[in-house]
Image: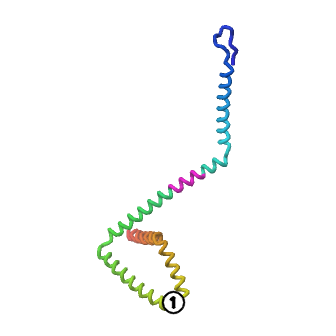
Amino acid sequence: MSTPSKGDKEAAPTPEELREQVEHTRDELGMTVEALAAKADVKTQAKEKATEFKDQAAEKAVVVTDRIRETTAHAAQLVKDKTPDPVLDKAAHAAAQVRETATRAGHLAAERTPEPVRDKAGSAVTMAKGKRTPLLVAATAVVVLVLLRRSRRRR
C-alpha cells in the first residue's frame, strides 16, 4: 500500500472499509485452506475414485449383460429360422418321447427309491424351481454355443 500524497484527493480508507477488506481476505483464506485440505486428503480421494470405478464397472456389467442377452436371443432366433421345418417337427416329436420316457423313469425311480433320498430330491427340486430363470438362461446359452460350434465346424 502506498501512502497518499498531499495532492491526492482520496482519503485513507475508513475503519469500516478496512474491516470489510479484512473479512473478505479471511473468507478467501478460509476457502483456500479448505481447498488445500481437500487436496491433501488422499484417503477421501481414493475412496471417491474407488466409488467412481465401482459405478463405472457396474454400468459396464449391465451393458455387457444386456448385449449378451440380445446376442443369445438373436442367435437362438437365427438357429430356429435356419432350421428346416421337418427337423423342428422331429425335434418336437423327440422331445415329447423324451418327456414320456423321463416321466416313466421318474415314476419307476420314485417307487424304488428310499424315503430319505426322496426327501432330499424334493428339496433340491424346490430349490431349482425357485431359480428356474437362471437355469433356463444357462441351458439356452449352452445349447446356442453347441449349435454355433457345430455350424462353424461344418464351414
Above or below, comparing residue 86 to residue 10 in the picture: below
Percent x, y for residue 142?
A: 45, 71
Q: Quadrant of residue 91?
A: bottom left
Above or below, comparing residue 26 to residue 5 in the picture: below
Percent x, y for residue 2?
A: 69, 16
Quick one: quadrant of the N terminus?
top right
Q: Residue at x 50, y 56 (%)?
A: 60
On whether residue 67 falls in the magenta region, the answer is: no
Q: Residue at x 47, y 57 (%)?
A: 63
Above or below, comparing residue 80 to residue 93 in the picture: above
Q: What is the chief secondary structure element of the magenta stretch? A: helix
Above or below, comparing residue 151 to residue 101 in the picture: above
Residue toward you, 16 or 97: 16
Percent x, y for residue 143?
A: 42, 72
Q: Quadrant of residue 144?
A: bottom left
Quick one: quadrant of the C terminus?
bottom left
Say which element carries label 1.
Answer: loop
What is the residue that sits farthest to the front in this orientation?
A: 16
Q: Which residue is drawn at 41% across and 85% down?
A: 103
Residue toward you, 59 or 86: 59
Residue toward you, 117 or 73: 117
Could you tell me the amino acid type at mark 1?
A: Thr
What is the residue that sits farthest to the bottom in this orientation?
A: 112
Percent x, y for residue 153?
A: 41, 70
Q: Residue at x 64, y 35 (%)?
A: 31
Q: Tell me the crowding category of disc 1: few under 14, some 14 to 19, or many 20 or more residues within 10 angstroms, Cα based.
A: few
User: What is the span of residues highlighted in magenta in the rendered image?
Assistant: 50-59
Q: Mark 1 points at which residue?
A: 113
Q: In which quarter of the image is residue 83?
A: bottom left
What is the residue that sits farthest to the left in this orientation?
A: 85
